Amino acid sequence: MQLQEELARYGYRQELARRLRFRDLVAYGLVYMVPIAPMAIFGSVYAGSGGMVALAYAVGVVALVFTAFSYAQMVKAFPMSGSVYNYAGRGISAPVGFLAGWVILLDYVLVPGLLYLVASVAMHAAVPAVPVWLWLLGFVGVNTVVNSVGIRMTAMVTRVMLVGELIVLAVFLAVAGWAMASGRGRFSWDAFYNPDTFTWSLVAGAVSIAVLSFLGFDGISMLAEETRDGTRQIGRAMAAVLVLAGVLFIAQTWLAAMLVPRPDALLADGDVNGTAFYDAAAVAGGSGLATVCAVATAIAWGLPNSMVAQVATSRLLYAMARDRQLPTFLAKVSVRRSVPINATLLTGAVSLALGLYMATRADGIALLSSLINFGAMVAFLVLHVSVVVHHLIRRRSGNWWAHLLMPAVGFAVLAWVVVNANIAAQRLGLAWLALGVLVLAGLYATGRRPALSGLTEAQPTGRSPERV
């Protein structure tokens, strides 16, 4: 009852079903991050880091552990869906919350489209007779149906898929380890540190690419209103997922780096075809292992990963819509399924349209990736600021470690990564932010100035969503 009372204090009713336990949150986060995610972008990170691919992932873990800590602080203060949108809006001010939500929309709305596109292109390569658009339609259709049935169905399906991903990863680690022991690779610590190529700016640029593999741990915060055991489990699940995934990412990329058949060519020419990891797998276990890794990656991105991404996106749209900062039809909740049905359907439709369009562009995957990473990191920067403003300044907290030092370090590391990110991503991301400022100005001009109940506890302004 305490969680329902917390929502009521902010003017909301408990509309979503509280059915998820800690293990469900961890499974959700791991599926969203995809334990085998580095397989798809290994070559890009390897080339971008001067071969220090394991170091790039290690720095990514450190950077985002601080971010997970800030999430834990804010979800305890505001236990509801909406992630950074809610935390910045209630922790700093409603207009800042709107802009934070707008920025993270760049991440959440584009992520499912990217995942569907990557998976469909990969499956088309494996089965050329089936066109990309048909794979897209199939992936979107299956995930939308599962997510519309209810959160428990999503949790069950993703757990099954997670087991499959972990089996494939275990097979690769075992075979690659045996290959190294048999002398088929080059044992080296260069993946962690190579004095011939090392510069901090190089590592930061690689981290800005590698962070794509980590996106998803933050999606756990979107499930704050669907968690049975209290919001404290949200922060714990985030930390657990980051550490587990980080260890798996570092292990598989280190082994792959020692098995790359032509490392000099990969550094010089990059991974144009996106097959660098699979080439390394072929060195370890032949074409069979390479095919298994490629197909598993495609299915993981196209089904479980995009499935949970669609869940997170629909919850963000739902949260902003019930505060009247997006069209209110997105706040409608299914009575039978306890899911934001319109937001779920819209996310599927946008993902399909975006995937079909980007499939016609040669730079579609690269463009989506850079935009998603930039939007996520900027939103994380705002999150760290919201911790300091809400807890240290507004609440006059005496916990300087949790409410100043930790978010300040997290902010500094992420700012360093953003500054060294792809220039095109910086420009497009800032253009998206500028568009958000114009939308915010339009809200003010039409008398719909953003207002959230967390700013004035005595006068809650949140509106309960409609149910269908």
Image: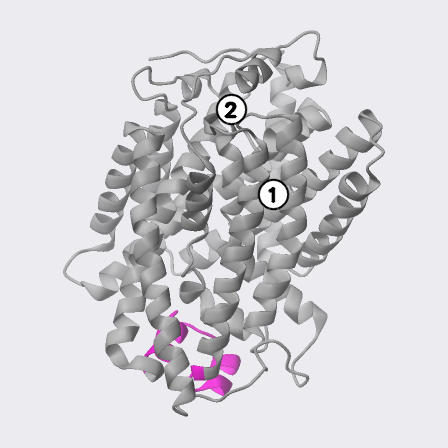
Question: Viewer-proximal residue, 124 or 459?
Answer: 459
Return the residue at label 1. 431
Residue 100: which quarter of the image?
top right
Question: Viewer-proximal residue, 317 or 239?
Answer: 239
Q: Is residue 353 visible?
A: no
Q: Secondary structure at mark 1?
A: helix
Q: Secondary structure at mark 2?
A: helix
Was residue 37 drawn as part of the magenta stretch in this picture? no
For the C terminus, give its image quadrant: top left
The part of the chain drawn in magenta is 259-282
In this rendering, which labeled residue sits more in front, label 1 or label 2?
2
Kind of residue indicated by mark 2? Ala
Question: Which numbered tag is attached to residue 319?
Answer: 2
Residue 119: give x, y in percent of width and height: 32, 55
Residue 355: give x, y in percent of width and height: 34, 47
At a point 72% along the width and 34% down the height, the residue shown is 386
Q: Is 269 on the left-hand or right-hand side of 144?
A: right
